[in-house]
Image (spheres, grey):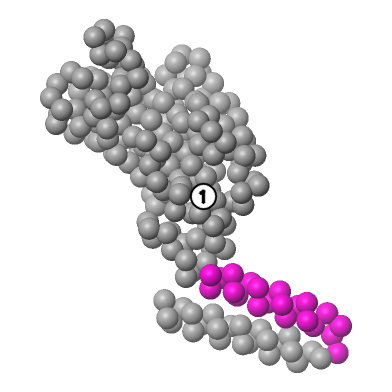
Amino acid sequence: MKALNVSLIAATATLLLVTGCATDDPNRRAKTGAAIGVVAGGVIGHQINDKNGRYAGAVVGALTGAAVGNYMDKQQRQLEQSLAEELQNNQIKVTRIDDETLKLEVRSEASFDINSARVNDDFRGSLKSLAKVIGEYDKTAVHVIGHTDSTGSDSYNQSLSEKRATSVTRYFSANGVERSRMRFSGRGESMPIDANTTSSGRSHNRRVEVFLKPIVEGREDDAYISPV
């Protein structure tokens, strides 16, 4: 990091010399300021790291607060267009949690066999379409969270939920989503959305959720905090 800063300072000095020599240039001051701004942005971008090792600021190109809503609106529309068939068949559900968070619920019976963490061959195309959109909207952090029903022991369900979240994360990574953007975890049977006393309810509870959170300038770390 120290060597990087020295190089950038040296680059700044070079720029100052180049722009400073042209004393008869009426725009010299503006050009000099712009040159310094470019290099300073690089320094700031390399000095401010979030907890997950990603650079913040100029390097990442984080969203400004005013741009977040529109960015997430566009991402939601593209997801709904790309996954129209899956949405119609209730295989995937897209929900806007708030202005800054999108939630995609992937039904387990569509994506995994019972007691399996291997993504079904028939569903790989759908996940690939999902990965394509997520990959294009690279100013979001991606949280993949697995859930199970209450059948089986707590430890078994926790392990299975983690394995399913891992499988989806790996599939996303293999299809163009940058690994450093993603976080994955399992919640086992601890967060049901329906009763576990019926077959239908257990089916609803077996799921993988994908949350998309924007990386916002000045609060980049927030994007990597789990939403649940």
Q: How many marks?
A: 1
Q: Position of residue 28 (x, y in %)?
A: 79, 83
Q: Residues within 10 Å of mark 1 (few under 14, many from 20)?
A: many
Q: Position of residue 187 (x, y in %)?
A: 27, 32
Rendered residue at 54%/61% (across/down): 57
Quarter-of-image position of residue 152: top left
Q: Is residue 222 visible?
A: yes
9 to the left or right of 174: right
- Residue 100 lies in the magenta-colored region: no
- Residue 26 lies in the magenta-colored region: yes
77 to the left or right of 108: right
- SS at badge 1: loop
State the residue position of label 1: 215
Rendered residue at 74%/89% (across/down): 20
Closer-to-camera residue (219/177)? 219
Q: Position of residue 189 (x, y in %)?
A: 24, 25
Closer-to-camera residue (150/130)? 150
Rendered residue at 27%/35% (across/down): 186
Where does the N terminus fall, quadrant-wise? Answer: bottom left
**Looking at the picture, which amino acid does disc 1 mark?**
Ile
Where does the C terminus fall, quadrant-wise? Answer: top left
Q: Is residue 174 visible?
A: no
Check the image and report above or below for 218 versus 41: above
Rendered residue at 72%/77% (across/down): 33
- Magenta segment, prevailing SS (helix, strand or loop): helix
Check the image and report above or below for 163 versus 137: above
Q: Which residues are magenta?
A: 24-44
Check the image and report above or below for 56 versus 10: above
